[in-house]
Image (tube, rainbow, N blue to C red):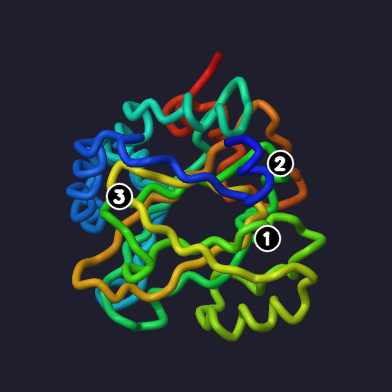
Amino acid sequence: MYNQFQNEGFHLFDEGAIAVELIDAAFNAIPDLFDNKSDTGLSHWGITKGHEQGALTRVAQPHICSEAFYNLLTKSDIGTSIAQVLQCNKLRVWGSQLYYKPHGNNPKTNVGWHRDSQHMPFFKSGVATLWIPLIDVTPDTGALCYVPKSHHLNLFETPTGAQDLDLETEAIRVMEHSTSQWTEHALTLSRGSFSIHQWDLIHGSKANYANTPRAALSVGIYTEHLKVQDTENDYGYKQILDNDFYCPVLFEK
C-alpha cells in the first residue's frame, strides 16, 4: 500500500472500509446542512448553494455541525488503515468539505484540475486528502478523477486551479508543459469505499450524467509529520488543529 501511494499518488480502500449505515446517515443529513440546521450547537463554515441553479454545492466543515458527518469520521475506524498507507503514528482531521453535484452536463458542476497544495499552501507536508463518496460512484456520476504520478512536481506542470472548469482545454495545456504522460483515472467506488491522495496529486471531476445527485465528503488529514508555512493564510484552521472536536484523532499508537 505504501509503495503504491508513493508511486501513483493515491490509494483505494475497498468496499466495507466504512459501514454503510454511517454513509447513509450522512447522506440523509444533507438536507439539514442545506437548511443550516445543526445538532451539535455549532455552525458549518460556509455553504455555496449551487445545486439550486444546477451547479456544484459546497459545505465547509459539515462534521462540526452534523453528528452524522462527525460519526462518519470518528466511528468508522478508518484511521488504522490510513496509518498503514501513510506509515504514521498519529492521524487527525484538519477539515472537511461536502461536495454535492446535481445531475446534468452543466460545466458549473465540474471541479477543475488542481493540486490541494496550490489552494491551501499553509499546509506544506504531513497532510493528505480522503475522498469518501456517499453514493455508489462511477465516471458517469462525475466521480473524482486522478492523474497518476502527477504529485511528482518535476514531471507535471501545475494546473491553473479548481476554478478553471474547462477540464479538457486545461488538460491539453498541462500536457504540453509536462515531461511525463498524462493519464486519467476516474474512480469507481461503492458506498463504504474511499480513496486517499497525496497533497500534490492533480485531480478534478467532471459532469454527473447519472439520474441522481452525486455527494462526496472530502477530508483533510494530518500526521505527526505536519509542517506549515506561517506566512500563508490558514483560513482559521491553525487555531483549531489541537482541538479534539474540530480535529478529531483518527489513529494514535
**Residue sticking out furthest to the bottom:** 169
Give how far across and how far down residue 225 sits, in percent: 70, 30
The residue sitting at 54% across, 61% down in the picture is 146
- Check disc 3 and give the amino acid type: Ser
Q: Which of marks 3 and 2 is in front?
A: 3
Q: Nearer the viewer, residue 209 or 158?
A: 209
Disc ID at residue 245: none
Q: For the N terminus, which image quadrant? A: top right
First in sequence: mark 2 vs mark 1: 2
For the point 67% across and 57% down, the residue is: 149
- Disc 2 + disc 1, Cβ < 8 Å: no
Tag 3 secondary structure: loop
Q: Nearer the viewer, residue 11 or 125?
A: 11
Q: Does dot 1 land on a helix, a strand or a loop?
A: loop
Q: Position of residue 18 (x, y in %)?
A: 32, 35
Q: Which mark is residue 150?
A: 1
How far is the residue under mark 3 from the one under mark 1?
Answer: 25 Å
Q: Is residue 189 left or right of residue 185?
A: left
Q: Is residue 75 left or right of residue 229?
A: left
Alpha-carbon distance for marks 2 and 1?
16 Å
Q: Residue at x 52, y 44 (%)?
A: 220
Name which residue type carries label 2. Ser
